[in-house]
Amino acid sequence: MTSNEQILRETEQYISEYFTKHISPEYVFHDFEHTVQTVAAARTIGEGFELDEHEMLLLVLATWFHDTGYSEGPKNHEERSCSNADHFLRGKISDNDLQTVQLLIRATKVPQNPQTLLEQIICDADLSHLGMETYWDRTGKLR
């Protein structure tokens, strides 16, 4: 296993490159900027709930991957995001942790119905843009 900090650094780099190579510019909202903002929100909310290091790791990993499935369009993108997480994280984290990451990604599927605290946090983080000052600028890109 790799250290948490190293896994997170490698994941951020991978996701940055993945979005550049695989996510169409037509997705002006579900882009790398949205992902970075969602990761920041997940961390902030997680810190507020005083998540332990392991819970925070799983939450942040899931958040980095949650929209990578847009590489093949929006329909069922969560399942492709889970596959992307599996491809990159297998061998870096335990199988149980990988399953948790995938459950967290699936929790972001609309309509959301989170069952655990971590699922609630990732869902709130994913929608956190709704309460930001940049909301109208970001949603204006959708027109």
Image: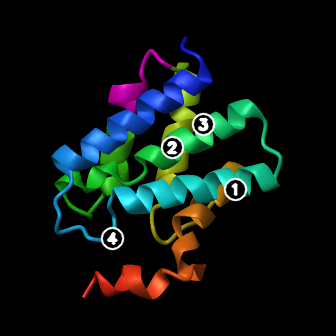
Which residue sits at x=43%, y=56%? 35
Mark 2 burial class by Cα count in 10 Å: few <14, some 14-19, many 20+: many
Q: Earlier in the sequence, mark 1 or mark 2?
A: 1
Marks 3 and 4: which is nearer the front? 4
Mark 1 lies on a secondary structure that is helix
Q: Residue furthest top?
A: 1
Mark 4 burial class by Cα count in 10 Å: few <14, some 14-19, many 20+: some
Decide if residue 4 is in sight here: yes
Residue 3: assigned label? none
Q: Which residues are magenta?
A: 85-92
Q: Is residue 116 left or right of residue 61?
A: right
What amino acid type is highlighted by mark number 4? Phe
What amino acid type is highlighted by mark number 1? Thr
What amino acid type is highlighted by mark number 3? Leu
Mark 4 lies on a secondary structure that is loop
Residue 58: assigned label? 3
Vertical side of 70 occupied by 80: above or below: above
Judging by the rendered image, the residue that carries numbered circle 1 is 44
- Residue 73 inside the magenta-drawn segment: no
Q: Is residue 132 left or right of residue 43?
A: left
Task: Tell whether label 3 touches label 2 (CB within 8 Å).
Answer: yes
Mark 3 lies on a secondary structure that is helix
Q: Earlier in the sequence, mark 1 or mark 4?
A: 4
Residue 62: assigned label? 2
Vertical side of 63 occupied by 114: above or below: below
Vertical side of 90 occupied by 139: above or below: below
Vertical side of 72 occupied by 88: above or below: above
Q: Position of residue 127 (x, y in %)?
A: 54, 71
Q: Position of residue 142 (x, y in %)?
A: 28, 82
